[in-house]
Amino acid sequence: MSQDKRQEESAGDEQRLVRLAQSGDSQAFGRLYQRYIDRVYSFVLFRVRDPQLAEDLTQEVFIQTLRGLESFDWRGSMAPWILRIARNTVVDHWRRSARRAEQPWSAVEPGDTDDESSRIESVAEEMERSEMARAEMALDRERVSLAAEQLTELQQQVLALRFAAGLSIRETAEVMSRSEGAIKNLQHHALRGLRRALLQSGEAE
Amino acid sequence: MSEPEPRAEELSAHLERVSAGEPVDSVLSDVTDGEMAQLVLVAAATQSVARADAPPVFKAGLQARLQAELLSGASAADGRGERALQPWLARLAAVLAALVMLVGSAVVASADAVHGEPLYGLKRAVEGARLSMQFDLAQRARLRLELADVRLWEIELAVDRGVPVSAAVIEDLLAGLGEAAADAEASGDEELVGVVRQASESSGTKLERIASSASPEDGELMLEAARYLEGDESVDQAPVAAPAGATAASPAASSADVSASPRPSSGGAEAEPSDDAGRDVASSPVPASAIPVAPPVMATAAPTGSDQPSAKPTAAPQAETEAPTAQPPTEPPATHVPLTVEPPTGAPATEAPTGEPTSLPTLEREDQRRQTQTAEAREPATATPTPTRQRIPQQGNHDATPTPPTHFGTAAPTPSPPPPLPPLRERRSGAKR
């Protein structure tokens, strides 16, 4: 209850800041910026894995945010809007640079039905919530980044929005223009894929 | 694909609890199979490694740029007047932002620069940028204290090196401390007001100590500034004259605590737009730690008054030792006041006799001399728009307390009639920046 209340207050506060910023109040915009800069940067960095590029793209995101502020319609939070700009900025960057031309941009998800998957799953079943499991999952940024590269674009987007930018399922759904159920499925597949990739990398070591 | 699969739904529910702040262990205790547990662990670990803070310098620079852009757009669109910053301010912010972004390494290198050195202007510009990014009043007051401490260190270093102390630096010290007091009062944090007051007095004491090693001319100016900081009623105007020529000697006393003066005077040295501007162009987070401002050589001294987190005073090189009390030149050198770090309330009053007759004439003379030394006193990047600075902070502090030695009197922010502006500031306004 108190958390809901806090969220409500926070949303109300944010709405007020958005209104002020839209009317040209730079201080209000500064506060909004402070709220989102790290989340946007985290999201972008998770996607591009290059700090310098992440700065460039983050800057681009906020310039677009500033320029689009006037036309922004408040819908309960600014997060989905600004993260959507961030997501599109990353996508545009890749399109421009053709670095990921081979990435599937559609929503087609693999079924996780290959043999390897079931083999690993059987291994996973044996792993209790034990110290062993924790050790196995002792992750670092590099390892996670490498593992995430094996995921589909949409899976990576979900992970970045949920865990780097800290969006809720609902907000993530809004950013990706999908239903919440679809996002839950994507999240599930993404984490399974990540776990699998991590286990593989662990076995390889 | 719109309906969540059962396990996807279950996983989502677990993660929701983690997002709500429940410990992962607690969530895992309700998980019944190993795979699901691993997925929760992977999610938690991913979150912990995926969250990253943008580099502070980048953050500050981008914010300044964005706000400058917003301001320039807004001021063109409507004449909201008060809230909108002057176009030059927007440009200044943009320039500062560019500085911050483009010369990161130089910024770091400039931290040790002192007045007259090539990187000093950059150092001051960065300070101004930090201030302009800080719109939390209490935080800004602490930052101002930190910067005032840097000024003290610069003064002491000049004395140590035997070079003339720039009057501009002393003036900036007083202005910065005054603005710290103003910000503290405006923040409504009475404890902070007290901290600033103590820091100001303590700063006066340190200045006295440094003065004892300085050339007579510099020393007189410093003593008057010190008396002002310590609340000597006879010094009703911020001294800030132009010391200039000085051939200081000996290892000065220690310096620096942080300090704050009651004098809110305008036109602080920080390349900061203006107080109003600072508030507008700014925003809080400014990582006080982002850019090292305090010279590394300095040892950290105990904060004067009390708790003073960010205003951590950096003490000067050979700190706490002898420190001949800033006796007026005429006094016998015998009196030594043990270097104390805490704010002098009673002691300084005796050390700095009020109404020291020697200072005023000297200040006048120095002031005139200063007119000819504008080049020396001018600081490149601090081309602060003094004239447009709008807020003259709580000068009330000054007169608010009829009883010395504290200008601030009680912690209670009682606004009072603004004291006369420092004469030198006025007289030198054309000469300085």
Image (tube, coloured by chain):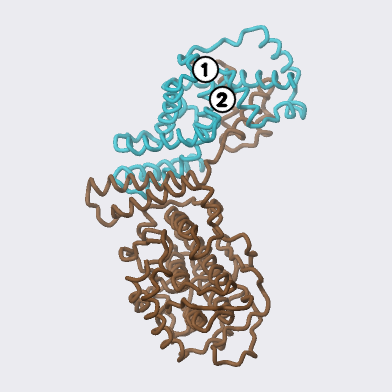
Chain colours: A cyan, B brown
Observer-nearest residue: B61 or B365? Answer: B365
Could you say which quadrant of the image residue A121 lies in? top right
Tags 2 and 1 touching, CB below 8 Å: yes
Q: Chain of mark 2?
A: B
Observer-nearest residue: B236 or A10? Answer: B236
Q: Is residue B304 above or below residue B8?
A: below
Left or right position of B99 against A16: right
Q: Secondary structure at mark 2?
A: helix
Does the rendering let one see residue B406? no
Q: Secondary structure at mark 1?
A: loop
- Residue on which disc 2 sits: B12
Could you say which quadrant of the image residue B362 lies in? bottom left
Q: Which mark is residue B144?
A: none
Crowd around label 2: few <14 · some 14–19 · many ≥20 (10 Å): many
Observer-nearest residue: A90 or B396? Answer: A90
Q: Amino acid at mark 2?
A: Ser
Q: Which mark is residue B4?
A: 1
How far across and how far down the image is residue A177, in percent?
Answer: 41, 22
Q: Chain of mark 1?
A: B
Q: Amino acid at mark 1?
A: Pro
Observer-nearest residue: A181 or B128? Answer: B128
